[in-house]
Amino acid sequence: QVQLVESGGGLVQPGGSLRVSCAASGSIFSIIAMGWYRQPPGKERELVAVSTSGDMPNYADSVKGRFTISRDNAKNTVYLQMNSLKPDDTAVYYCYLKVKRYSVQYDYWGQGTQVTVSS
């Protein structure tokens, strides 16, 4: 089994910064991608940023230039540095992990961490 433990969410004022982290453990085998999705209140879950092994990160247009995704492969951890935060960034942020075991791909999700941008 695979576990994803998120941390770092919270309340921040507009224009502020926040970093969320997600550590993966368990039967990971080969990581294909790690990243973040978010679900704003009353809306569908949407991609924020995904880091695919051996490829450039993919960002949602709404966060380009403000958010940066990074990975520590030795720790199986993904980070999302969020700068110049806006109220529209308020959402539950979910960690995402895609792994491959014996030629089969599996998707995993974290429990979610709340990010609230408000004055």
Image (cartoon, rainbow, N blue to C red):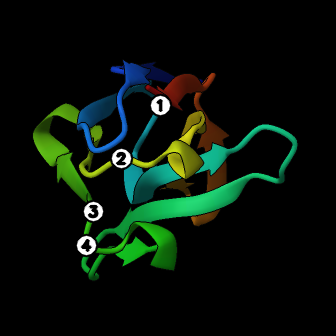
Q: Are marks 2 and 4 in contact (CB under 8 Å)?
A: no
Q: Is residue 64 left or right of residue 49?
A: left
User: Is label 3 in a helix, a strand or a loop?
Assistant: loop
At label 3, counting other C-alpha atoms closer than 10 Å, the crowd grade (few under 14, some 14-19, many 20 or more) is few
At label 1, counting other C-alpha atoms closer than 10 Å, the crowd grade (few under 14, some 14-19, many 20 or more) is few
Residue placed furthest toward the right:
42
Residue 66 image label: 3
**Which sits earlier in the primary sequence, circle 2 or circle 3?**
3
User: Is label 1 in a helix, a strand or a loop?
Assistant: loop
Q: Amino acid at mark 1?
A: Ser
Q: Amino acid at mark 2?
A: Leu
Q: Are marks 1 and 4 in contact (CB under 8 Å)?
A: no
The picture places residue 74, in percent across and down from the top left corner, at 12, 39
Residue 27 image label: 1
User: Is label 2 in a helix, a strand or a loop?
Assistant: loop
Distance from Cα at disc 1 to Cα at disc 2: 35 Å
Q: Which residue is mark 4?
A: 65
User: Is label 4 in a helix, a strand or a loop?
Assistant: loop
Tag in front: 1 or 2:
2
Residue beneath the point at 65% across and 52% down: 106
Q: Nearer the viewer, residue 111 or 60?
A: 60
Residue beneath the point at 35% across and 29% down: 13
Q: Amino acid at mark 4?
A: Gly
Distance from Cα at disc 1 to Cα at disc 4: 34 Å
Tag in front: 2 or 4:
2
**Which sits earlier in the primary sequence, circle 1 or circle 2?**
1
Residue 85 image label: 2
